Image (spheres, grey):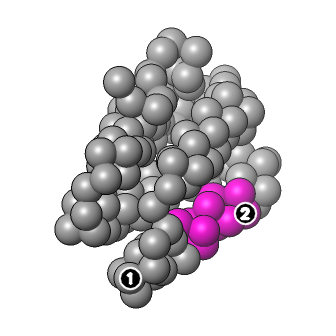
Amino acid sequence: MGIIQWSDRFATGDKSVDEQHKELFRLVNKLHDAMKQGKGKEHTVPTIKALAAYVVKHFAAEEALMERSKYPGLAQHRKIHEDLTGKVGVLLADAQAGKNIFTTELSHFLADWLRNHIEGTDQKMVAWVTSNSTARAAPV
Ligand SMILES: [Fe+2]
């Protein structure tokens, strides 16, 4: 059982965005399970590295969608993305430097951030995009 489960309440209306969110859920669950099972850094560091890389690709896909559709909330939404990208980058750097960042608080933070961002920010964005343009997100 993971820390975050997909359900229809997270659906945005854009198939690619939803697929990318599912992959983020999978990576957060993988990180959480590795930490819970007390797996060593050889498991946790590659997982947080994969998560950091996928976060960057996914945010780029969303931002391209917002640019193509001329979404008026782009700058604000991008700032929220940059904030998380920065946090995940620090986590990865700390993990690679051998610091012990792997606590269940971290996976709870990531899971809460994703839930809140999807329900509070992404759904609003996709609703606007789909009713104001024909743009759809690219798969990642
Ligand atoms: Fe977003």
C-alpha span from label 2 to label 1: 29 Å
Q: Which residue is mark 2?
A: 79
Nearer to the camera, 136 or 57: 57
List x then y, in percent, for residue 120: 74, 33
The amino acid on which the numbered mark 1 sits, given as a three-letter code, is Gly
N-terminal label among 2 and 1? 2
Which residue appears at 45% of the width and 23% of the height?
A: 5
Quadrant containing the N terminus in the rendered view: top left
Residue lying at the far bottom of the rendered structure: 97
Residue 30 position (above or below residue 49): above
Q: Which residue is mark 1?
A: 98
Magenta stretch, main secondary structure class:
helix
Label 2, residues with CA under 10 Å away: few <14, some 14-19, many ≥20? few
Magenta residue span:
79-88
CA neighbours of label 1 inside 10 A, class few (<14), some (14 to 19), many (20+): few
Mark 2 C-beta closer than 8 Å to ligand 1:
no
Are the residues flagged by discs 2 and 1 in contact, CB closer than 8 Å?
no
Give 80 or 100, whichever is nearer the viewer. 100
What amino acid type is highlighted by mark number 2? Lys
Q: Determine whether 56 is above or below 140 in the image.
A: below
Question: Does 120 sit above or below residue 66?
Answer: above
- Locate residue 57: give its quadrant: bottom left
Residue 68, label in figure: none
Q: Nearer the viewer, residue 77 or 101?
A: 101
